[in-house]
């Protein structure tokens, strides 16, 4: 004795639409995932900020002022620096602070900062100062800061 089983499947039109939707959703997910690997390119004067970092030339001298230090910064390069990041090292730990004072090309400035002791009360072994450039994100009208990580100055006597 045979039992009649009615088998019905999806129509070819609905199956095609579902397949197209699946491909679109997967392509959007892959695009958003891959976009995280590609950073935003910051430009200044129409050039990538990474290229301008090689034109940055500055010197820093720290003068002890009783608990605080006065940093004398001279910009000898032909690119204006928008800010500075100070990275303090202490026996394997590090701490970053920022000086939000800009300096134009060929000028100098003095800034009073707290150096020598980190927030966890450890004494600082060495200090590294990085220039920060202010540029425009390529393809957008928004501005973004870019830290020149390879062009730093070390302070040893502070």
Image (cartoon, rainbow, N blue to C red):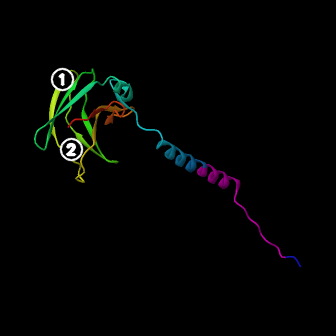
Q: Quadrant of residue 124?
A: top left
Q: Nearer the viewer, residue 65 or 99?
A: 65
Q: Position of residue 135 (x, y in %)?
A: 31, 31
Q: Position of residue 82 (x, y in %)?
A: 24, 32
Name the element at disc 1: loop
Name the element at disc 2: loop
Give the alpha-carbon distance from disc 2 to disc 1, as whole Å: 26 Å
Q: Is residue 130 magenta?
A: no
Q: Which residue is mark 2?
A: 116
Residue 81 visible in the current orientation: yes
Q: Are marks 2 and 1 in contact (CB under 8 Å)?
A: no
- Res. 107 mark: 1
Q: Position of residue 92 (x, y in %)?
A: 35, 48
Single out the mark in the foreground, 2 or 1.
2
Outermost bottom residue: 1
Of the image marks 2 and 1, the number of the one nearer the N terminus = 1
Residue lying at 21% horizontally and 44% vertically, measured from the top left: 116
Residue lying at 24% horizontally and 41% vertically, measured from the top left: 98
**What quarter of the picture does the N terminus occupy?**
bottom right
Q: Which residues are magenta?
A: 3-22
| Structural crowding at the residue carrying mark 2, measured as other residues with C-alpha within 10 Å and reported as few (<14), some (14–19) or many (≥20) | many
Q: Nearer the viewer, residue 138 or 118?
A: 118
């Amino acid at each position: 004795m045979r039992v009649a089983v009615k088998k019905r499947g999806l129509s070819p039109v609905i199956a095609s639409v579902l397949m197209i939707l699946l491909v679109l959703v997967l392509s959007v997910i892959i695009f958003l995932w891959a976009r995280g690997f590609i950073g935003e390119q910051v430009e200044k004067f129409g050039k990538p900020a990474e290229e301008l970092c090689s034109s940055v030339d500055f010197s820093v001298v720290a003068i002890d002022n009783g608990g605080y230090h006065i940093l004398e910064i001279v910009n000898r390069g032909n690119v204006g620096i928008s800010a500075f990041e100070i990275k303090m090292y202490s026996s394997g730990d590090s701490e970053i602070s920022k000086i939000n004072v800009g300096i134009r090309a060929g000028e100098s400035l003095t800034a009073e900062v707290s150096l020598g002791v980190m927030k966890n009360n450890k004494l600082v072994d060495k200090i590294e100062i990085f220039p920060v450039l202010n540029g425009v994100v390529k393809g957008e009208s928004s501005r973004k800061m870019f830290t020149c990580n390879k062009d730093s100055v070390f302070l040893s006597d502070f």
